[in-house]
Image: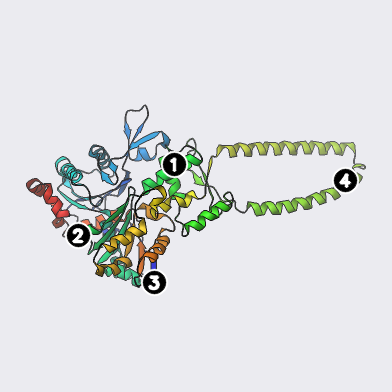
Amino acid sequence: MTSNTGMLPLTPGLGPLAPSIYASNTNNKVLIIDNGGHTLKIATNNPSHPHIIVPNQVGKVKNEKHQIMGEELINYNDPSEVRTKNPMEKGYITNWSLEKEIWDYAFKRDDMKIKPQDYNLLLTEAPNSLDDLRKTMYEVVYEQYKFKSLYLTTSSTLGLVHIKQQLLQYQQQQHQPPLDSSMISLLKSPCHLVVDCGYSSTHIIPHFQNTRLNYAVKRFNVGGKLLTNYLKEIVSFRYWDMMHETKLMNTIKERTCFISSDFIYDIKRCQIDKLNSPLKIDYVLPNYNDPNNKSGYIKENNNNNNNNNNNNNNNNNNNNNNNNNNNNNNNNSNEIKSKKEEEEEEIKLDDEIKMDSTGTATTTKEEDIDQILALVNERFTVPELLFNPSDIGMNQAGLAESIVQSINCTNSNLHIPLYSNIILLGGSTLFPGLKERLELELRKLAPERYNINIFQPQDPILSPLYGGIRLAQQPDYLKNSVSKQDYEEYGYNYCNKKFF
């Protein structure tokens, strides 16, 4: 049967879609927090409040007492001097005192100014959280921050809500081009499989009528954090010590890495001629003393230099022949030249030599300033862990195998629509070539009679936040949340029954 990988036709965000995302129902103030392992994405259902993205980390510089977070952490002059602490481990909040510091910073920002007791909270968490961790979360939300109510869900569910509402709006407004058959199927089908490749791990979450099927959720512990750490180790072993350059290596990973469609073939290509491989990229490392080069950049590829050198050699040979002929002519002419002309030529030659030497010295000096990191097979061996965690000794199934295992845990009647409606969310899905490689791998494992359709929103990182804004506008939003009064009367077990 056929396979399809598609990019959803709309550009999600708070721009053109703002009128539909922010409906007229703003009587109940709702604060949406997509609590990711790498960043917090925060918004409200009030269109006058912008959404913000805050690092979910706290930094500490040696010999300084105060902690840094937020914009100061992002824009710190030398990130290698900063040691960071994260309140989350393996996707779950384990240090609530540290998480509260980050929340307090975000709530007090001039562009937010949130008073928690005036808001209902819509919060995301990873699937299958431990009961003790969830109990602590309820205490913080209801007893310390005193939010009016809590709606607890996963980022995958919110991302699905946003995508379906987006497609519905696109269809109702009769945009061009019209939705194709696969998009219409995605909109109308009650079954969807959301693949959330996050910072800490990757989750495969089947949904039926926008409700996740917890018994079929699959997880493997490969995410953006592990990939960045793996790249750090490889570069530190082969080139320079980068173990304290987490932020830089994460940037390099995002800018240079890709998913190979044929891993073995690309490995062999790199082994034949590593220096002149078409996959080679020269990355100029940042110079923290240069305000224009704080994160480095990819140097332009010079693969055509060899051809140019060959042409230059041929030209040089011709020039040598011409020079020999010129020398014979010059011998005759030198006899005619006067002494004054010879002195003038010597002066010109001396000036040219001085100019050449000055230019060469300057060029050499400029080249010495730039530190260049040459990446070849590192570009695709690092994200390959998403498909083959066993490459570093992890006894876990990869992305394609986990999807098949998750679908096989569901009722057989759901298999066809689940394979036909796979949605990619999370920052690690932005690697070029991931959708195509996943389609190839699934085609090998899935029955031939099943269609495979893979979709990805334009912004797989912020789609859950937009979905939370849409969900907060629903008239039955409060019916599906747990109020502070209900928590105080019935306890945290009531919350677990309501949400799970």
Badge 2 vs badge 4, beta-carbon distance below 8 Å: no
Q: Is residue 399 above or below residue 369?
A: below
Where's residue 291, x and y in %? 47, 39
Upstream in sequence: badge 3 or badge 2: 3
Amino acid type indicated by mark 3: Thr
Q: Which residue is drawn at 79% across and 36% down?
A: 347
Foreground of the two, 271 or 173 = 271
Q: Can residue 22 be seen in this view?
A: no
Pointer 2 residue = 474
Upstream in sequence: badge 1 or badge 2: 1
Q: How crowded is mark 1: few (under 14 residues within 10 Å), some or many (20 or more)?
A: some
Q: Residue at x 35, y 50 (%)?
A: 395
| Label 1 SS | helix
Upstream in sequence: badge 2 or badge 4: 4
The alpha-carbon separation of the residues under discs 1 and 4 comes to 62 Å
Labelled disc at residue 330: 4
Pointer 3 residue = 2
Number of the front mark, 3 or 2: 3
Work out which residue is located at the far left of the displayed protein and give it.
489
The alpha-carbon separation of the residues under discs 3 and 1 comes to 40 Å
The answer to whether residue 374 is left or right of residue 27 is right
Where's residue 383, x and y in %? 42, 52
Badge 1 vs badge 2, beta-carbon distance below 8 Å: no
Pointer 1 residue = 233
Amino acid type indicated by mark 1: Glu
Upstream in sequence: badge 3 or badge 1: 3
The alpha-carbon separation of the residues under discs 3 and 4 comes to 76 Å
